């Protein structure tokens, strides 16, 4: 081999090596960026759930003698929908009967279904979409049930359209 062939070969190897390093650097940056976005989204969603748990504590103190809500208590319950806590509606269950809802769609007949804590209803009666509910006792006979708004994935939208497959 002469000097000219060695020079061309060394240039080719240098260019291929630089491209290889560039691709590795680029892929590692993309991976780091995606992980940072996912971590931000996890923190945001976790804060939403923690805020609901804080609201539960304050409502247990405020409504410790709640039975059938008075007008003043109804206004307090309606204020929950205006706070930035992702609650779409609130129901009051007294002696296993729905007695009040912010949607005003419930009658006083029929037993209420509730599980304490977070639960998932696969098909909502209004929207036919999944809904997350949170139920808790404010006293021995009264239960408050929160229906949460659909999740808004604000950070993950940067990566593409987010979808949740339940089944």
Image: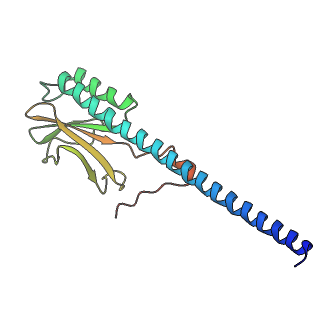
Residue 91 position (above or below residue 31): above
Q: Quadrant of the N terminus?
A: bottom right
Is residue 164 toward the left or the right of residue 32 in the image? left
Q: Is residue 84 above or below residue 3?
A: above
Q: Position of residue 108 (x, y in %)?
A: 15, 41
Side (left or right) of 125 relative to 44: left
Identify the image quadrant of residue 81.
top left
Residue at the location (19% across, 42% down)? 107
Image coords of residue 132 (percent x, y): 31, 47
User: Is residue 31 visible to the viewer in this orientation of the structure?
Assistant: yes
Image spot of residue 104 (x, y percent): 28, 38
Residue at image point 30% right, 53% down: 125
Q: Nearer the viewer, residue 41 or 122?
A: 41
Q: Is residue 87 visible?
A: no
**Which is more toward the observer, 119 or 1?**
1
In the image, what residue occupies the spot 72% across and 63% down?
17
Nearer to me, 118 or 64: 118
In the displayed orientation, state which residue is furthest to the front: 2
Give the quadrant of the C terminus. Answer: bottom left
Where residue 60 sits, quadrant-wise, is: top left
Residue at the bottom extreme, as displayed:
1
Identify the residue at image location x=33%, y=26%.
79
């Amino acid at each position: 081999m002469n000097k000219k062939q060695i020079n061309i070969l060394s240039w080719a190897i240098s260019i291929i090596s630089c491209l290889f390093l560039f691709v590795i650097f680029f892929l590692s940056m993309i991976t780091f960026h995606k992980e940072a976005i996912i971590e931000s989204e996890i923190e945001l969603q976790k804060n939403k759930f923690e805020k609901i748990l804080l609201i539960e504590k304050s409502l247990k103190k405020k409504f410790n003698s709640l039975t059938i809500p008075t007008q003043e208590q109804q206004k307090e319950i309606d204020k929950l929908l205006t706070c930035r806590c992702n609650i779409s509606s609130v129901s009051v269950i007294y002696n296993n009967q729905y007695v009040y809802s912010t949607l005003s769609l419930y009658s006083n007949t029929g037993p209420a279904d509730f599980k304490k804590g977070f639960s998932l209803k696969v098909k909502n009666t209004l929207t036919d979409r999944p809904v997350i509910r949170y139920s808790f006792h404010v006293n021995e006979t009264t239960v408050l049930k929160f229906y949460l708004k659909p999740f808004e994935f604000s950070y993950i939208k940067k990566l593409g359209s987010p979808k949740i497959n339940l089944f």
